[in-house]
């Protein structure tokens, strides 16, 4: 049993990372007071932008690893730009944030395939070379921890974990973070204290867009290697992780690890005899059922930002 | 009236955006639209196909419109539609009965399946105040995986792992009468079912106590409760009807337009139902009209793709952009009231959008 866990753990982490960064982005958005159910679409946009940039650059500079990082940066920027659509609708126009998010999802999934077909003819974009996994010398020899965390690891994993730490610091230890959270809890009080609620919410949505784009591009550049117009519901899973993690960075980390693990077990259950006793369908629906249960359990004591999803009108009390 | 103008503006802007997109990617927009429209309406067969494409959209659109009217956002229509279609397919592949009875049983299974899938979020909303948007999204993915494993396990096709066996002819909604009327199109009895549903839903919404109570819940939950309406029961009822309608949409898609069910796909018609309901201003007739419009785009895109080299996804993109414009329609509303004010229409009523005025009016009546 231990051997199996040792084997699948690195895969579970690889699968967790895109979820983690996307859910972390959504945390910024919801903490600032804007619900973002367009995560799925923003991830798709990111995976498209990443795949396109990387495949173009790899044509000109074959074999260079920096092309992948440029792809991630491009995905981040395009994610930010695309999320402005959601920000404009929900902040300036006080539009229904759920409808706007749904529109983002639909525009992203159809527009990217439309563009990809114009570019490649098939609607798919393949990249030649993905990030390579490696064992960290020294650390990977530590008993128990080594095989779990430091073997078959990717640079992107450590990068995203650093982003997680930086985000936590930003949210809880800086003035900016306090202001952002205030806009999601009590925007009128925040405004009275001289904070521009609009600007904070724009910031939250843009971070969410950029992080989701990054998440989409990480899928392409680590385990998938190909853009095909879908991220298979990972954006919605990230939304579930945000709720299950109760809108806290390390809660989100725990929830995404948990979901990453469940999904990985479901994916490999066919080849590992010990898992064959559990029907795959149970493992697959597990995260969603758990989220529903969590919603019920936390319904009385939810830590959701109080003003999340509510348009802010300056004059309203 | 204002709502119709807003919807038309959203459509026009969506089409303009589509034209720009075609032009930017090096295609001729005029040619593209010519083939797109003629592909949907050129002859009787194509008109039939357009109506067939519109059929599931009418039902999912009604589903969404019904939930909107009760103040619920049932984004779970894809899951409800899929599960309804799955139940109908299961009945059609399992039982051997006279045709009329079998189709009735399938329709019932589809309605109950969809209703069941919506019942859980409805109950969670009523009992625990769990937001229906999140819970229905979770239900979508639960359904996705249930069907993903359920179809290969119980209804596997002879060759492909990814779809179920074909339904026998008598277990589909195809009927020679309609097929002949539209020169061999795949339009089917689902269309009649959808039109009946339009009539029934507008009757429920406009003429019954139930519809009245549900609308009251949608306008102002607290006021409705104060007036003695059982709000929680209303929420559950509304979700059941909304889910059932989406389930019927699944029947018309998987046992009418197609004859089997695919796995690994949440039906796009479920999401398009949101667009249909928004454009149709949550009114049954509006839903019917906007479904037919979307039907033209969807059934014409294949022809356009064959005659030009424009990718068929342009139709989906246009629809998605239309939803975005519908979501931001407040911009046009502001624009319209600004224009009418500039025309010196100063004596006109205070600047209140139609919807709000209607809300106030209806809530006032509740206490009577």
Image (cartoon, coloured by chain):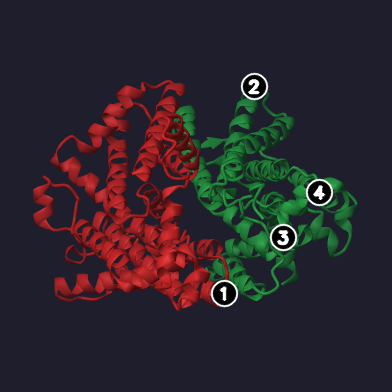
Chain colours: A green, B red
Relative horizontal placement of residue A156, taking residue B354 as reference (left or right)? right
Say which of A262 and B78 sits in front. Answer: B78
Q: What is the number of the mark on residue A60?
A: 2
Mark 1 vs mark 4, foreground winner is 4
Query: Which structural element holds mark 1?
Result: loop
Q: Residue A250, percent across and down?
A: 78, 60
Percent x, y for residue A130? 66, 39
Q: Chain of mark 2?
A: A
* Element under disc 3: loop
Do dots 1 and 2 share one subunit? yes
Subunit bearing disc 3: A
Mark 2 vs mark 4: in front:
4
Q: Where in the figure is residue A274, as x and y percent of width and height?
A: 62, 73
Q: Residue at x 90, y 51 (%)?
A: A138
Instruction: Name the residue beneath numbered marker 4.
Output: A193
What is the secondary structure assignment of the residue under circle 4?
loop
Instruction: Give the letter of the chain under mark 1.
Output: A
Sooner in the amino-acid sequence: mark 1 or mark 3: 3
Q: CA distance from mark 1 to mark 4?
A: 55 Å
Can you say whether B162 is above or below B94 in the image? above
**Residue to which mark 1 is pinned:** A278
Between marks 1 and 3 in the image, the one whose residue lies nearer the viewer: 3
Q: For mark 3, does the 10 Å Cα neighbourhood hold few (<14), some (14 to 19), or many (20 or more) residues?
A: many
Question: Which mark is first along the chain, 3 or 4?
Answer: 4
Nearer the N terminus, badge 1 or badge 4?
A: 4
Seen at 62% across and 70% down, the residue is A295
């Amino acid at each position: 049993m231990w051997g199996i866990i040792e084997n699948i753990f690195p895969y579970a982490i690889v699968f967790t990372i895109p979820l983690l960064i996307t859910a972390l982005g959504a945390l910024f958005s919801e903490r600032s007071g804007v619900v973002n159910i367009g995560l799925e679409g923003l991830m798709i946009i990111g995976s498209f932008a990443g795949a396109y940039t990387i495949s173009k650059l790899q044509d000109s500079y074959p074999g260079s690893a920096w092309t992948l990082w440029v792809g991630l940066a491009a995905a981040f920027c395009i994610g930010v730009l695309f999320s402005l659509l959601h920000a404009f609708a929900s902040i300036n126009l006080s539009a229904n944030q759920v409808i706007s998010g749904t529109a983002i999802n639909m525009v992203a999934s159809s527009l990217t395939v439309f563009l990809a077909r114009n570019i490649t003819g098939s609607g798919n974009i393949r990249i030649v070379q993905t990030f390579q996994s490696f064992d960290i010398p020294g650390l990977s020899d530590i008993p128990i921890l080594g095989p779990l965390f430091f073997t078959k690891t990717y640079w992107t994993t450590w990068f995203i974990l650093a982003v997680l730490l930086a985000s936590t610091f930003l949210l809880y230890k800086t003035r900016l973070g306090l202001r952002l959270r205030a806009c999601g809890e009590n925007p009128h009080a925040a405004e009275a204290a001289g904070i521009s609620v609009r600007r904070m919410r724009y910031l939250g949505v843009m971070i969410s867009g950029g992080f989701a784009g990054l998440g989409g591009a990480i899928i392409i550049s680590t385990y998938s290697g190909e853009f095909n117009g879908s991220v298979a519901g990972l954006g919605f899973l990230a939304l579930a992780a945000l709720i299950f993690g109760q809108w806290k960075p390390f809660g989100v980390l725990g929830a995404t690890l948990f979901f990453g693990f469940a999904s990985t077990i479901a994916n490999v259950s066919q080849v590992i005899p010990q898992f064959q006793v559990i029907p795959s369908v149970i493992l697959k629906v597990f995260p969603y059922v758990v989220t529903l249960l969590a919603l019920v359990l936390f319904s009385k004591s939810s830590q959701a930002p109080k003003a999340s999803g509510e348009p802010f009108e300056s004059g309203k009390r | 009236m204002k709502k119709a103008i807003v919807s038309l503006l959203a459509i026009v802007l969506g089409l303009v955006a589509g034209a720009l997109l075609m032009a930017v990617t090096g295609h001729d927009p005029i040619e593209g639209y010519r083939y797109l429209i003629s592909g949907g309406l050129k002859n009787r067969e194509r008109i039939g196909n357009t109506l067939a494409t519109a059929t599931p959209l009418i039902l999912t659109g009604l589903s969404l419109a019904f939930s909107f009217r009760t103040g619920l956002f049932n984004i779970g229509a894809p899951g409800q539609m899929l599960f309804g279609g799955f139940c109908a397919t299961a009945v059609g592949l399992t039982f051997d009965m006279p045709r009329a009875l079998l189709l009735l049983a399938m329709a019932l299974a589809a309605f109950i399946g969809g209703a069941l899938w919506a019942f859980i979020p409805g109950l969670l909303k009523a009992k625990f105040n769990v937001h229906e948007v999140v819970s229905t999204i979770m239900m979508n993915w639960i359904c996705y995986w249930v069907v993903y494993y359920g179809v290969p396990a119980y209804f596997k096709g002879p060759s492909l792992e990814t779809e179920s066996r074909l339904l026998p002819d008598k277990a589909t909604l195809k009927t020679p009468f309609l097929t002949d009327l539209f020169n061999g199109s795949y339009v089917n009895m689902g269309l009649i079912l959808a039109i009946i549903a339009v009539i029934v839903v507008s009757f429920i919404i406009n003429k019954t106590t139930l519809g009245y109570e549900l609308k009251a819940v949608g306008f102002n939950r607290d006021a409705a409760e104060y007036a003695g309406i059982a709000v929680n029961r209303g929420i559950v009822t509304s979700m059941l009807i909304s889910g059932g309608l989406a389930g019927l949409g699944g029947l018309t898609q998987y046992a009418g337009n197609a004859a089997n069910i695919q796995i690994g796909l949440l039906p796009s018609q479920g999401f398009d139902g949101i667009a249909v309901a928004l454009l149709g201003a949550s009114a049954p007739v509006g839903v019917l009209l906007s479904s037919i419009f979307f039907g033209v785009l969807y059934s014409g895109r294949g022809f356009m793709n064959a005659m030009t080299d424009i990718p068929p996804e342009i139709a989906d993109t246009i629809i998605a952009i239309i939803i975005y414009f519908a979501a931001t329609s407040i911009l046009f509303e502001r624009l319209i009231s600004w224009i009418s004010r500039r025309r010196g229409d100063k004596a006109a009523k205070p600047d209140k959008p139609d919807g709000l005025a209607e809300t106030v009016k209806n809530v006032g009546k509740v206490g009577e």
